[in-house]
Amino acid sequence: MNAPVFSFLEQAAAKWGKRTAIIEGEKKISFSELYKDSLRLSRILISQVDLNGRGIGFVCTNSSRFVHGLFACSKTGGVVMPILPGTKGSEIEILLNDSSINIILAEKSSRFNFSIPAEKIGIDDEFDLYIFQGIKSQDIDAVFAGAAFIRPSSGTTGNSKGVVISHRAVFERTEAANDGLILNEESIMLWVLPMAFHFVVSILLYVRYGACMVISGNFAGANIVNLANRYRATHLYASPLHFRLLASEKSELKFESLRTAISTSALLEPDVSRDFFNKYGITASQAYGIIEIGLPFINSESGNKKSESIGKALPHYKAAILDDDMRELPHGAKGAFAIKGPGMFSGYLWPAKKVEDVLVDSWFLTGDIAEMDEDGFVFIKGRSKSMINVSGNKVFPEEVETILMMHQSIENAKVYGGSHPVTGEIVEAEIVLKPGAVKNAEEIISFCREHLLPFKIPQRIIFVEEIAKTKTGKISRV
């Protein structure tokens, strides 16, 4: 292990103590204050529970609390699994059972409706601790040495899996990513993304290299521009949805200090990229991040000439387009998109599978279909996974199907993505009803609202007589 994650904050406080680390609203938090808050919370956690090597769920909104809470959990020796705020109790219980985690640290404003007993402990003015005695806690570090974080992901099969990321991987990922981003203590990052989904090669990277983060709570185009100008933001790291909002902004506002704009989570449409550039005179660079590896691609070289590309692999990474026999294909040929390089994940937690058993000839197969031109620029052409991308938020069909199958009227369900002009995709579902059940799409959607985050709720229900299956009895997703 190069260094534990907490050392990023420890060293930042020693090097840039009085400098501003986070701006939220009218409040400015220095690196020293962030460090002290994190250290205080970690000591409280250690006094309450033994987390060394074990998992802890972490629920917190975008705020400085998220940052010092994340570092505090890591300081305890725990393996942290950030969970998006607003996630329903039933969804959280599935995550906890899958990962054998029986403790959650949650912001006090969190509201849960759990079906299994949980002891709630108010540990300070900001957080509550939930302990689930009915869930067995496993020593994750004993399975994956040096484990630091768990992130739910579709994995290579399309099924939701827990990606285990080690302290060493975090060190390597942040170092490799900054070779492309080149951040330092003069960098000011405007933050608009969900922290629970983006924290390794963003939040942790910013702290490590002394960048200041300005948290935006309002995603209207005018607000983003005004906030960036007020605090002299130099970088914007956002999703295609944010760029669509900015490109369609009707005011004459312009960015005054922004130097770099990076789009992540999903591919940015060429027309949005063009409109954003025409309005602000800034190129929106396409980035390609992947939970299992980090941030191996940023299209920062081509300007608008190859805006549909995710760019070339950053210096420490290698990419290839492979055929079914794992042979590299010539330029312009479509095939399986594979990557190798530093910061590789340790494996999947459920079911436990080491990275060595996932890689093929040291390549990680992303599940995307792509092609590479003669200059090394990669173009994503499709996705072989079943994952649905709603405004950059990833939805696994299987988890929505699990909730649908809990409905008393549903015999079977199939979930998939449908195209949408604003969000990119929406969730759609085919439903087979039980004999005698009455078709009521609104009632089913209302049921989903009780158990799923808004972006996971099916926007279209189609009642069918049967659902196509493979020869092995699984749902056909072709």
Image (tube, grey):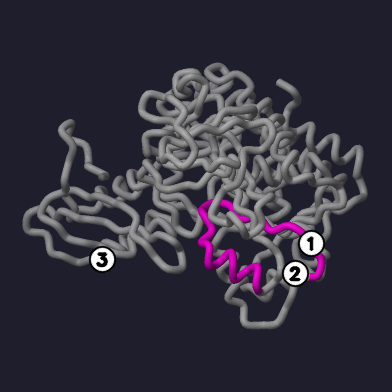
Closer to the camera: disc 3 or disc 2? 2
13 vs 448, left or right, is: right
Residue count near mark 2 (Cα–Cα under 10 Å), binned few <14, some 14–19, many ≥20? some
Closer to the camera: disc 2 or disc 1? 1
Whether residue 47 is visible to the viewer of this picture, yes or no, is: no
Give the residue at mark 1: 233
Task: Identify the residue at horizontal 60%, vertical 49% (top origin).
Answer: 287
Q: Amino acid at mark 1?
A: Ala
As for residue 275 lying within the magenta part, the answer is yes
Q: Which residues are magenta?
A: 256-278
Vertical placement of 162 versus 25: above or below?
above
Q: In whole angstroms, how far apart are the C-alphas of marks 2 and 1?
A: 8 Å
Question: Which of the two discs, 3 and 2, labels the residue nearer the N terminus?
Answer: 2
Looking at the image, which is closer to me, 120 or 300?
300
**Does the CB distance between marks 2 and 1 fall below 8 Å?**
yes
Residue count near mark 1 (Cα–Cα under 10 Å), binned few <14, some 14–19, many ≥20? many
Give the residue at mark 3: 443
236 vs 332, left or right, is: right
Q: Looking at the rendering, in which quadrant would you find the C terminus? A: top left
Looking at the image, which is closer to me, 388 or 136?
388
**Does the CB distance between marks 3 and 1 fall below 8 Å?**
no
Q: Position of residue 90 (x, y in %)?
A: 39, 47
Looking at the image, which is closer to me, 44 or 224?
224
